[in-house]
Amino acid sequence: MELEKKARALRKNVVMSIGVGNAGHLGGSFSAAEIVAALYFYKMKHDPKNPTKPDRDRFLLSKGHVAILQYSALAEAGYFDISELPRTKSIGSKLQGHPDARKVAGIEACTGSLGQGLSIGLGMALGLRLDGYDSKVYVLIGDGELAEGQIWEAAMAASAYKANKLVAIVDRNNVQAQGKTAERFPIDNIAEKWTAFGWRVLEIDGHNITEITNALDASDNSEQPTVIIANTVKGKGLDYAENHPAGYHNMPLTQEQFDQAMELFSTGGDV
Amino acid sequence: MEHVNPRVAYGETLVELGRENKNIVVLDADLGGSTMGKLFELAYPERHFEAGIAEANMTSMAAGLATTGKIPFVNSFAVFSAGRAFDQIRQTICIGGLNVKIVGSSAGLSDFGDGATHQSVEDIAIMRAIPNMTVICPADANETTAATKAIVEYNGPVYLRINRHDTENITPSPTTKPFTIGEPTLMREGSEIAVFATGITVALALKAAAQLEGQVSVRVINVSTIKPLDSNKITKLSEGCKAIVCAEEHSIIGGLGSAIAETMRANPKPMAFVGIEDTFGVSAHNYEELLEHFGITAEKIAEAILKVGISLAR
């Protein structure tokens, strides 16, 4: 399927962005690869040739540390050339460690201080509504990030304002920087929490393209803001990353790992 | 219309500007009655957002609104708008260079009764330290009106510091003199000591200069834009004077005095600071007694002028 190929291409682009020897957020990128592929190549109204078109849909990466995943999607979509990806985090590169809206076309806001993306997305949704656009705003949030109190301020405010064009997607990969969320800082009953805050809740397998696209489509018609809880695997696609205690959170690749991964995601190996 | 209360001047100016400029939106965190955001809410309810008592979310929401072409004014008490939402201001608004106006209302000691938790002694310091941020502290209601108009015309993040209380209008009517961001104003000629003041201390410095007439010739400069601060302009405005006094309703750490010292580091002059000495505020029954308690008075400024003058004569 086309979107599965896109997700594989994003994983390859992510590996290319990390390169050899330097740390990079492979795990958290791979857990959200299908979600981001579905947004950029199926769901969102956007135009790489006119990235500031006022009625475009917006995507915000609240878990900004996986900037390389968004860069990979933007490059794949044609916002800039894929050959720029290996320059990520080099001094002078526009591809910063966290998304910088001033430097990269297609990045909507500077994110990465965790917990703030949903509030920014809510502000966008309110501004778009004032101007009469029916654009949607998608915000990708990490599950560890749900510990940030500001998310719940935004959740409360979004339902108070009936921001029904706002969609939060929780990348529920069960692993944060220091290990499993269940062991480090348990964040349970996620669906119940969002329901209590007045959101419409959809729960899916975050690597199943059909479930992702169905959920994204279902979010079009809602009186309330929608949250999609996407159950995912951190590091999905590479055995050693999936089995790593922190899901290969900000880790380097050896030359051998790099070559193998590039090969795997280029040839369409089973992921 | 002229006002004597800076926050009323601010609120009414927003209503006036909002009539023509449909992009202006205002956010409050349950303090609209104090910040005067309520005036905008009454006039244009669809462009006013009650964010609830949640300043962090309010500030990031403003960032999002700015990306859609709106000009958000984010209102709260200065301690909260600058302190509680510091990270939101820094990360998305200032790194992104977004057109958000952060309004620090009831600033300095002007919320006299509420004590240390509600009195901002460090807001200028923390806002000034963020790259891309412009920091403005008007001297009176007239200048608050003029500054509010000016920052709507300027595309970028601004911190506007507003006093809670009636002030004597010492700057010209905003209809006669528009506000220029980054332009310090000479308020009184003098040849021996230059006093750089901001906010309510400009009026106090003018009083001190008048008290010392015949004794010391005192020049008074209103530094209503604390950032950006042009080194050449400050050097020029202190030309001929043998020493400098800085006065502010703020901690002496990181405020106007520090900013002046930084700009003059290549051509230093002896300096004295009148401000709050690295301590939190306290509750008082009225504003005047609190200002007196912390030595933010014309008398203390006069004392500082004499002291720095005498030390040089020795």
Image (tube, coloured by chain):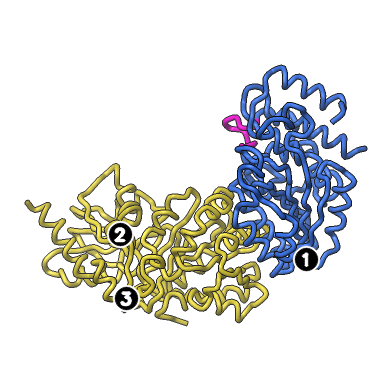
Q: Chain of mark 1?
A: A
Which of disc 2 and disc 3 is earlier in sequence? 2
**Where is mark 3, residue-wise?**
B287
Q: Viewer-proximal residue, B26 or B286?
A: B286
Q: Residue furthest left?
A: B314
Q: Chain of mark 2?
A: B
What's the residue type where badge 2 is placed? Thr
User: Which mark, by number, is residue B279?
Assistant: 2
| Residue drawn at point x = 41 percent, y = 76 percent | B173
Binning the other alpha carbons within 10 Å of mark 3 as few (below 14), some (14 to 19) or many (20 upward) gives some
| Residue drawn at point x = 46 percent, y = 58 percent | B83
Would residue B205 be seen by someone viewing this image from the given angle?
Answer: no
Q: Colour of chain A?
A: blue
User: Which mark, by number, is residue B100?
Assistant: none
Tag 2's secondary structure? loop
Residue stretch rendered in magenta on the structure: A88-97
**Where is mark 1, residue-wise?**
A224
| A72 over A132 or under it: above or below | above
Evaluate if marks 1 and 2 touch, with contact meaning CB atoms under 8 Å apart: no
The image position of residue A223, as x and y in percent, is: 81, 68
The image position of residue B46, as x and y in percent, is: 67, 74
Tag 1's secondary structure? loop
